[in-house]
Image: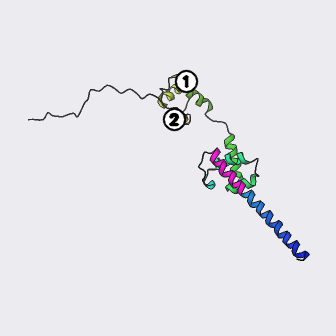
Amino acid sequence: MTLKNQEKQKELLLKEVEDLQKQVHQLQLEKALLEGAAELLKKEKGVNLLCLSNQEKTILIDALRNQFTLKELLQQLQLPKSSYFYQKQALEKPDKYYKERQLIITIFNHNFCAYGYRRIHQALKNMGKKLSEKVVRRLMTEENLFVKFSRRKKYSSYAGKFLLHTPIY
C-alpha cells in the first residue's frame, strides 16, 4: 500500500469511529430517556416519548439535564425551548390553594373522616372562606379524602311490592 492510501484509510476509519461514537451517544440518550420515563413518570418501559405531555417532558428533561445538553434533550423529545421554559415556570409556581387545602384536610380529619364535600364547603363558608363546591371536590380528590362511612338510610318497613288494590278471589 502506498502512503496516500494508508492516510485515506486512516481518515475513513477515524470518521467511522466518530460516527459510531455519535451513534452510541444517541442510543445512550434514548435509553436514559426511556428509563427516566419509566422511573420518574411511572410509565411502562415501551412508552412513546412523543406522546408524553409537555409537563412530563419537562420533568424528564430536568432529571437528565446534568448528563446531556438541553439542546439534545429538546431535539430528542421534540419540545420547543419556549414550551420547556413555560412548563418549568409553571412547575415552580406555588400552589394557589395551599391554605385552603390544609384547612380542608384539618376539617375532614377533625370530623372523623365523615364530612363530604358539601359539609366541608359549608364549614368553609361558615369560616368566611369563599370556595366553590367544584374546587372543594377537586382538592379532596387530589388529597385522596374519601368519606369512610356512608349515610344511614331512613328506616323503611317496606318488604315487597305495593298493591294498589287487593286481588279478588
Q: Earlier in the sequence, mark 2 or mark 1?
A: 1
Secondary structure at numbered mark 1: helix
- Magenta stretch holds residue 15: no
Above or below, comparing residue 33 to residue 145 in the picture: below
> x and y percent of residue 153 in the render?
36, 27
Above or below, comparing residue 43 to residue 11 in the picture: above
> x and y percent of residue 151 in the render?
40, 28
| Render colour scheme | rainbow
> x and y percent of residue 152 in the render?
38, 26
Tag 2: residue type? Arg
Task: Give left or right: position of 144 versus 90.
Answer: left
**Residue, x 91% and y 75% (percent of image)?**
3
Query: Counting other residues with Cα less than 10 Å from the Cα at mark 1, is it few (<14), some (14-19), or many (20 or more)?
Result: few
- Magenta stretch holds residue 40: yes
What whole-number distance in Å separates the C-alpha atoms at marks 2 and 1? 18 Å
Q: Which residue is mark 2?
A: 137
Q: Which residue is mark 1?
A: 127
Q: Nearer the viewer, mark 2 or mark 1?
A: 2
**Residue, x 56% and y 36% (percent of image)?**
142
Residue lying furthest front in this view? Answer: 1
The magenta stretch is 27-41
Tag 1: residue type? Met
Task: Give left or right: position of 13 versus 164.
Answer: right
Above or below, comparing residue 134 to residue 75 in the picture: above
| Depth check, front residue: 13 or 156 | 13
Q: Quadrant of residue 41?
A: top right
